[in-house]
Amino acid sequence: MCTSSLKTKRAFWIAEFFLFASVALFAISSNSSSSQISSNDFGKDVLSLMNFQADAWNRGDLEGYMAGYWKSPELKFISDGTVTQGWEATLERYRKRYKADGKEMGKLRFSDIEVTYVSENLAFVTGRWALTFSKSPDKPAGGYTLVVMNMADGWRVVVDNTTSDKK
């Protein structure tokens, strides 16, 4: 295995560990690196990632939306008790849920975005998401915690833990 692959793998596992320890990190970070997204250059890069994903989604471009995720079999997407492992599997999950049988993707909006930096290349992003549909009165919404890493091709989501609000 090449050195860069080992470094990426090690960084991923570190990121995964930090996701599950995020409550403690958020408490600790209140005195150090926590910042609102608008007040930090790194945060602006992460905000650009979030805006890029929302814009792609709102165009109906699922592959464009997925470009914001780490294109790796080690990507983790956790939603409502289900763990999906890998970029391809995550894309397929989204296709089944939002593209199959003429389903509408809707319009995606992110809000309440906060970024906590663990290092120059690793951050947690928390916030809310909401979807609206032109053909349905449903308005699903929820929260998320992301682990994002600054990689050779920019900031990418490596772990996504998304929840849905109870109806």
Image: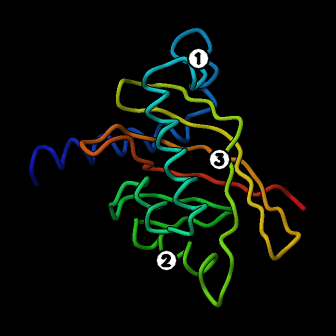
Q: Secondary structure at mark 2?
A: helix
Q: Which residue is rendered at x = 38% and y = 41% of the image? A: 155
Task: Quickly name the residue at label 2.
Answer: 92
Could you tell me how far apart the alpha carbons at marks 2 and 3 are, in whole angstroms? 20 Å
* Residue sitting nearer the eye, 4 or 99: 99
How would you rate the neighbour count of disc 3 (Cα within 10 Å): few for under 14, some for 14-19, many for 20 or more?
A: some
What amino acid type is highlighted by mark number 2?
Glu
Please determine whether, in this image, residue 56 is positioned above or below residue 120. below
Label 1: which residue? 28
- Which percent across, then down, holds residue 42? 43, 25
- What residue appears at the point 67 percent right and 45 percent down from the top-left corner? 110
Residue at the bottom extreme, as displayed = 101
Please identify, in this view, whether the residue under mark 1 or under mark 3 is nearer the observer: 3
Between circles 1 and 2, the one closer to the viewer is 2
Which mark is on residue 76?
A: none
**Mark 1 Cα within 10 Å, few/some/many (few <14, many 20+)?**
few
Give the left or right position of residue 34, taking residue 154 as reference. Answer: right
Residue 74, position as x, y percentages in the image:
36, 59
Q: Position of residue 105 (x, y in %)?
A: 65, 71
Q: Viewed as shown, does residue 163 lie left or right of 57?
A: right
Q: The N terminus lies in which quarter of the figure?
A: bottom left
- The quadrant holding residue 132 is bottom right
Q: Secondary structure at mark 3?
A: strand
Q: Residue 111: percent from the left, percent from the top?
A: 70, 40
Measure the alpha-carbon separation of dots 1 and 3. 20 Å
Q: Tell me the residue that label 3 is attached to.
A: 144
Amino acid type assigned to the residue bearing label 1 in the image: Ile
Left/right placement of residue 104 relative to residue 54 reads right
The colour scheme used here is rainbow
